[in-house]
Image (cartoon, rainbow, N blue to C red):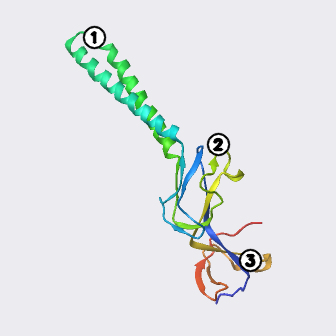
Amino acid sequence: HSRKLVLSGRTEADKKVNIAARTNGIITELRVRRGDHVKKGDVIAILSDEARDAQVDRARALLDQKRRERQAREQLIEKGTMPRLNLLDLEAQEKAAVATLAIAEAERDRGVLIAPWSGIVNSVPAEVGQSMAGAVPANTGSEIAQILSLDPIIAVVEVSERKLAGIKLGTPAEIRLTTGETAKGKVRFISKS
């Protein structure tokens, strides 16, 4: 028969993430409030920067131009009025234009902040109209929102070394919350300190 330990502890979210700007811009939309439930992929906030849209348009126009140049010169090469060697250079220019467009689109997409998983919005320290600096580390004020994943929820308890002997990873556990509800789980981590 197994022994029973009664311990006090606290509950914590399984995962916690600070949603932060990865690029510069001004918050034009903040789509969440504290306590909101979000699903993976939900838009949390949108940063405005017209320059990003202009860079995408410019890159798209450059790609269209390079494609038309290559197509026109392919016809000249087929007719024999232009050396075939020019085609390799044109293909390289077109590939470079494709890469430039991909970079511009990725930079534009950094202005749309999304939930990496489903959870609850724990805090929203940012406000619409606030300027964000993407190069700043997330812990120095560029946080827009914090999301917690409460499924599963983790119970953290401290056990004295004397009582630690029978506890192993995978040992069944039951917790009673302050609300009186109980939940069953298992030991998934034992700290060495």
- Does the residue at mark 3 contact the one at mark 1 (Cβ under 8 Å)? no
* Crowd around label 2: few <14 · some 14–19 · many ≥20 (10 Å): few
Secondary element under disc 2, as helix, strand or loop, is loop
- Does the residue at mark 1 contact the one at mark 2 (Cβ under 8 Å)? no
- Taking the spot 62% from the left edge, 63% from the top edge, the residue there is 16
* Crowd around label 3: few <14 · some 14–19 · many ≥20 (10 Å): few
Amino acid type at image mark 2: Ala
Secondary element under disc 1, as helix, strand or loop, is loop
The answer for how far apart the CA atoms under marks 3 and 2 are is 45 Å
Disc 3 vs disc 1: which is toward the camera? 1
Nearest to N terminus: mark 3 or mark 2: 2
Q: Which mark is residue 164?
A: 3
* Crowd around label 1: few <14 · some 14–19 · many ≥20 (10 Å): some
Q: Quadrant of residue 184?
A: bottom right
Q: Which mark is residue 135?
A: 2
- Taking the spot 40% from the left edge, 23% from the top edge, the residue there is 93
- Does the residue at mark 3 contact the one at mark 2 (Cβ under 8 Å)? no
Q: Position of residue 144 (x, y in %)?
A: 62, 56
